[in-house]
Image: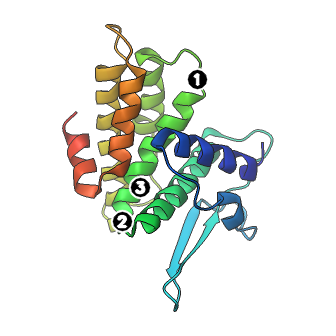
Amino acid sequence: MSERHLAARVQGALERLYGLDRVADVEDYLSEERAPHEREALFVRLAEDGAIEVRLCLPAMGPDASLDAICQVIEGVSHFVYVVERARLQRETTQLELELQAEVDKWVVLAESIGAFDAERSAMLRERLYERVAFEHDEETEIGQRYRMANEAAHRFVRRLERDYLSAAGQRHSELREELRRFFHEGQEEKLRLGRAA
């Protein structure tokens, strides 16, 4: 599957989950210019006329795409969907908010691809996404701190979702979807509070 096809599928999945109307197709904003081994990046600029210009760079996906490459596509599309929705609502967003939402969206999209998803499978996925992770940026840097904060808050939030909605006592998928929708529409402080509440 090409990064373009995966990006379109991820956009559709996120929009269905969060109940969003399609404002723009992510495929129309993908950049074909990228250096080898370049990581995903969303470029956002305010034009002179007040319009928001967006360009998304995704890593090339070969026939044996790694989990890291797949997660980068999910993260890039998550950023795109979030920025477009915030722009539509004329709401601001922060880089931490974008990263935190993308960390949760990685779990959401990958969980959807796992048949018979339950607390045990979620715990295995959560461990892979949030515990067995390496960071590109030093812990002392601002960006390094931001990525670690987003990772930790998402980890705690997903662990609470497992406990509350995927436990052996009874799976409550419709309530899980409602909680994920609520999280998506919240701002940075409430997102962090929901992460800390786990």
Of residues 105 and 181, the one nearer the viewer is: 181
Q: CA distance from mark 3 to mark 1?
A: 23 Å
Determine the residue positioned at 52% across, 56% down: 81
Name above or below for residue 22 compared with residue 104: below
Q: Looking at the image, is mark 2 or mark 3 earlier in the sequence?
A: 2
Task: Give the percent coordinates (x, y) of residue 70.
Answer: 63, 44
Report which residue position mark 3 lands on: 99
Q: What's the amino acid at mark 3? A: Glu
SS for dot 1: loop
Q: Dividing the picture into quarters, in which one does residue 166 lie?
A: top left
Look at mark 2 in the image and give the residue it sits on: 93
User: In front here: 179 or 144?
Assistant: 179
Q: How is the image coloured?
A: rainbow
Q: Is residue 128 left or right of residue 71?
A: left
Disc number placed over residue 167 in the picture, else none: none
Q: Does the CB distance between marks 3 and 1 fall below 8 Å?
A: no
**Where, quadrant-wise, is the N terminus in this rendering?**
top right
Q: Residue at x 47, y 57 (%)?
A: 82
- Give the residue furthest to the bottom: 48
In which quadrant is the C terminus drawn? top left
**Dot 3, crowdedness within 10 Å: few (<14), some or many (≥20)?**
many
Quadrant position of residue 131? top left
